[in-house]
Image (tube, rainbow, N blue to C red):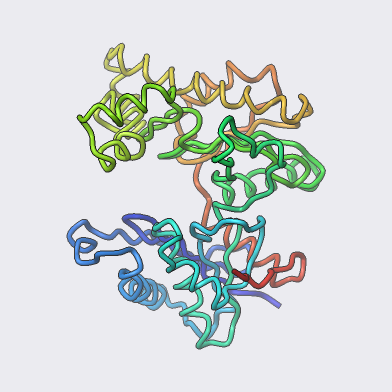
Amino acid sequence: MSYKILAVNPGSTSTKIAVYEDEKELFSESIVHSDEELKKYQKVTDEFDMRKETILNSMNKHGVKEKDLSAVVGRGGQLVNIHAGGYLVTQDMKEKLVDASTIEHASNLGALIADAIAAPLGIPSYIYDAVGSDEMKDIAKITGMPEIVRESFCHVLNSKAMARKVAAKAGKSYQEMNFIVAHLGGGISVSAHERGRIVDAIPSDGGPFSPERSGSIPLNYIVDMCYSGKYCKREMTKKITGMGGIKAYLGTSSCLEVEKMIEAGNTQAKEIFEAEAYQIAKGIGELSPVLKGKIDAIILTGGVAHSKMLTDWITDYVSFIAPVVVMPGENELESLAAGALRILKGEEQADPYKK
């Protein structure tokens, strides 16, 4: 028996979808939403009908009928206090994703749209490896401020999927190996994987700067800026996410453009790009003691991993720790579909989400 699975990954300015028949991709599409289109909506949840309609239109265009689907799986959204792996979309989950206490993000629409398409068909809807999945050790959650507990936020979906692929190539299971995975995208996170669990992680605001995020900055500087009277909260937030990192220095978040600058002899571009590699390497080194040096491989993944210049610099710094495997791309739709397929085949279980 084969399974057809629709994977849905809503982002801030696009909705990425794909349909798989077992492991085979039937089609994929990135549906771009213009600024003009998005300005019509006050909140992300207001975009629900528009995004759902574009997905159904895309399926129709590619000749995939809704009635032939076996399941729909969506990006997990900003849920907290959940484990990695699969969850069934429930009424509790839908209520939590639209609750004011949940961080507003386009990924929250993943489960809502998945359920809206699946429910009338009588098929299951899932989320898989949500960004807030928490497998961290208790000791990793302690900070220097009792009021603040570290939470597990990293690129769980793609990081785990790439670790599974590397393990399979080695003839082993993900649960038999240890990895450090650096997801290099618009935001950068680094995670320590110990026998199938992400036991510690450096989030995108707590480590290396990225193409558009500032990464970790000494706190006293941030406090001074916040109370300087020069910036409002929104402006500071944009400095951290969206207008930080490489973009703040060079005016672009495109690594391809940065490489062109370097090739043209721009010494500042080379210095900043190499500094990013340096900080990523430091993040990998920071997590190495968590696994007590027992690391089977260091995996560099995400869209920015397409830059051989950057990955070569990182490899030069960290290859003494463990072999480095470069697996470019985000692979999120494939990862969602693969997770749903394992559930449908009975290889994994999807828990019903409860508040």
248 and 97: which is toward the camera: 97
- Report x, y in % for residue 135: 69, 48
Tell me: residue 102, above or below residue 60. Answer: above
Q: Residue at x 63, y 58 (%)?
A: 82
Q: Residue furthest left?
A: 36
Where residue 106 sits in the image (x, y, percent)? 39, 59
Query: With respect to residue 262, does 98 lie above or below?
Result: below
Instruction: Identify which residue is drawn at 77% across, 65% down.
Output: 347
* Side of 321 relative to 155 (left or right): right
Q: Is 251 on the left-hand or right-hand side of 278?
A: left
The residue shown at (47%, 66%) is 97
The quarter of the rendered structure image containing the C terminus is bottom right
**Relative image position of residue 176 (x, y in whole percent):** 82, 43
The residue under the point 50% across, 33% down is: 206
336 left or right of 135 in image = left
Quadrant (top left/top right/bottom left/bottom right) for the N terminus:
bottom right
Q: Quadrant of residue 254?
A: top left
Q: Quadrant of residue 105?
A: bottom left
Image: 34 above or below 4:
above
